[in-house]
Amino acid sequence: MIDLRDIRTAARRLRGVAHRTPVVTSRLLDAATGAEVFLKAENLQRTGSFKIRGAYNTVASLSEEERSRGVVAFSSGNHAQAVAHACELAGVEATIVMPTDAPPNKRAATEGYGATIVEYDRFTEDRQAIALEISERTGACLVPPFDHREILAGQGTCGLELAEQVPGLDIVFICVGGGGLMAGCATALTSLQPGVEIRGVEPAAADDTFRSFAAGHPVEIPQPDTIADGLAPRRPGDMTFEINQRLASGIDLVAEEEIATTMGFLFERLKLVVEPSGATALAAVMSGRVPVEGRRVGVTLTGGNIDANRFAEIIARFHDDR
């Protein structure tokens, strides 16, 4: 597994590459929750999400011989962009396996960083199997989105920064897709602030980690259909599940409407554009299901990669439903 030393090593690699993103607060949010809420704004990160942390740390750790063979990754968008940009910075060729229905802005950004796109149907094909075949055929190094030591260590730098920026946190809410961000951040936060509670959050429509916690082992679900496309893996990773089961106190589920409402709140009140996946952790806090009154609460806003039309569509639906 990883430890704080791995995360600090990743932080050194990322210095000058990843932004040290700000922590945002809101008196209105504090009043609504009865807590002190601190939002780690990874929507303002390079490539628009936290994913550059793990991607660059992984690419930077490759040997020269490995770099010469190129990199292959699979992703619906944010990891794709991050790997493509990391490879661009390192002078490494990148091939990214992306679903045919990937958000157009995420595909365009990935291509803009110079990556070659290989399409697949997320409902009928296995993206990991496609990437593995490419890796075996070409020799390219596989950079998975979450179940990888250097990926986890890189993502953990988000938690490292949060612990340094906000002392004395009582509880931290972290969105869960494959579980890499939560595993890395939980490792950093519990090392630096012993006693802090870690809560994972995922859409109710993509509840693989919730079911896995209940079962005591990783559980695979049918392909999720959720507005939070970045949180739609069918199964948590083996490494991430083991770490998260050990360090997190539980997984909370939020409805699609709650995610949309949170996006609207962040836009209207804090002037932050956050994609559905990025708003999911805060949606759990705003739902009131987990008592946070009187506590110092950390929340990850994990990304802001959403095009204007899609953002307007979701916000319009939020207003119509309200």
Image (tube, rainbow, N blue to C red):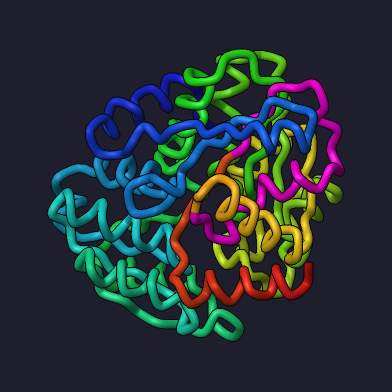
Image position of 38 with respect to 221: above or below: above
Q: Position of residue 85 (x, y in %)?
A: 26, 56
Residue 307 seen in the figure: yes
Image position of 275 with respect to 59: above or below: below
Query: Which of the 4 image quadrants contains residue 298?
Result: top right
Q: Is residue 282 left or right of residue 158?
A: right
Q: Position of residue 302 (x, y in %)?
A: 52, 48
Q: Is residue 78 left or right of residue 290?
A: left
Residue drawn at x 61%, y 15% is 193
Of residues 321 and 292, the one drawn nearer to the viewer in this rendering: 321
Query: Which of the 4 image quadrants contains residue 12?
Result: top left
Of residues 165 and 199, the one drawn nearer to the viewer in this rendering: 165
Residue 224 seen in the figure: no
Q: Position of residue 301 (x, y in %)?
A: 55, 45
Residue drawn at x 64%, y 74% is 316
Tally of numbered tags: 0
Q: Position of residue 66 (x, y in %)?
A: 21, 51
Of residues 45 and 127, the one drawn nearer to the viewer in this rendering: 45
Stretch of the chain drawn in magenta: 273-299
296 magenta-colored: yes
Query: Which of the 4 image quadrants contains residue 260?
Result: bottom right
163 magenta-colored: no
Residue drawn at x 55%, y 79% is 122
Quadrant assignment for the C terminus: bottom right
Residue drawn at x 44%, y 56% is 144
Of residues 222 and 48, the one drawn nearer to the viewer in this rendering: 48
